Image (cartoon, rainbow, N blue to C red):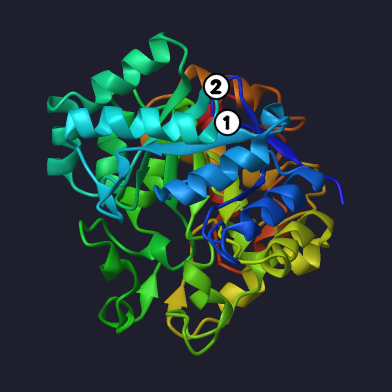
Amino acid sequence: MRMVYRNLGATDIQVSEIGLGCEGFSEAEYRMCGDLLDRAADSGVNIFDLYASDPQVRAAVGRTLHGRRNKFIIQSHICSTWKNGQYLRTRDLPAVKQGFEEMMRLLDIDTLDIGMIHYCDSLKDWDEIVNRGVLDFAQKLKREGRIREIGLSSHNPQVALKAIETGAIRVLMFSVNPCYDLQPANEDVEQLWADSAYAAPLTNMDPERQKLYETCQRMGVGITVMKCFGGGDLLNAELSPAGAALTVNQCIHYCLTRPAISSVLVGAHNLEQLDAALAYESATPEERDYAQAFTSFPKISWKGHCMYCSHCAPCPQRIDIAEVTKFLNLAKAQGTLPETVREHYKVLERHAGDCVQCGACEQRCPFGVSIRANMKRAQEVFGY
């Protein structure tokens, strides 16, 4: 197995495409923290998320990091605090500052790689983050070199979009999976998985979510993924809102083929679950392929929507159709041609203008996408 690394947006940080969540760190009286981080380091995983504010979890992480701090990119959460023996999310600035100092002391580090402003799912809450000094505090920490990048964790595309459009947020931790991606913005995260949300047949990605991913790509905001497996429900046909089960490889591959995704943070509770995710790196294209599974879902259809699954390949003209389509969608979402998109398109080996309109790709597309029309449109947008 050989780990693949990706740029974290436009930052100078490179992260493993498989990362680690902290859900299992408290297992076995906190010993699992060391086991998971040991296996992660041995396997090339170099990023983990620490949303937990439990001092014993943070202390366990600090002990495990001793002598090898440079092996990990640490994404840990500002505003996730501990009070009276319980987790508390707060926007009270003195409590936020005190919680940050305690976190740094327990982790025994001088610099945090990603200071993640914790769990913002409403526009009112984002306004509080701005108006009560939390964002200013994070920016001060960055100026002082105590954090390298400022992030935000959210499940709401409206809120996430407003935050990243300020230019202050460089890393977004966001819930991504093929069922969540169908649902519109909502301040109640539980609605993303509510039975009522999937009672009627659903078609295609929510446009606000697509706009969020494309805007992150355009602005150089790296996305680290949470909820890739929907808490495990997507892996179980009886629990999945789609009405059918996906595999670990399919869930991970879906996330990694969305725009702007840098790393999928796996919430492993034990070594077996982590190993199952790590097996993605040696999986065959057939084992990763989610397209055929999607076409069999009884409750969901992605008809006419490019999923970047590359079933259209191989093109006889060697055009990377999925990449061309992704850049076309980025340009369409912006309403103009951003320089970054233009330059990324430019370095492709072949371009839309090389398309001979043979239609072989459309015969292979599981989702009925009008690929030839997309190639014509891309040639018009990019000029070749």
Q: Are marks 1 and 2 in contact (CB under 8 Å)?
A: yes
Position in image of residue 371 (x %, y %): 59, 53
Residue 273, image quadrant: bottom right
Q: Which residue is mark 2?
A: 11
Identity of the residue drawn at 51% across and 37% down: 75
Pick the front one: 321 or 244: 244
Q: What numbered label is drawn on residue 8?
A: 1
Determine whether the residue tagged by mark 2 lies in a helix, strand or loop: loop
Quote the CA–CA distance across marks 1 and 2. 6 Å
Quadrant of the snapshot with the C terminus: top right
At a point 46% along the width and 21% down the height, the residue shown is 147
- Residue type, numbered disc 2: Thr
Q: Position of residue 320 (x, y in %)?
A: 72, 42
Residue placed furthest toward the bottom: 238
Tell me if residue 108 comes above or below residue 357 in the rendering.
Answer: above
Instruction: Tell me if residue 230 can be seen.
Output: yes
Say if 344 sits above or below 297 in the image: above
Instruction: Describe the element under mark 1 as helix, strand or loop.
Output: loop
Tell me the residue at 36%/30% (across/down). 100
Q: In the displayed structure, does residue 306 sit left or right of residue 140?
A: right
Height in image: 303 above or below 308?
below
Q: Nearer the viewer, residue 59 or 293?
A: 59
Amino acid type indicated by mark 1: Leu
Q: Position of residue 67 (x, y in %)?
A: 73, 30
Comparing 168 with 97, the one in front is 97
Does the image show residue 257?
Answer: no
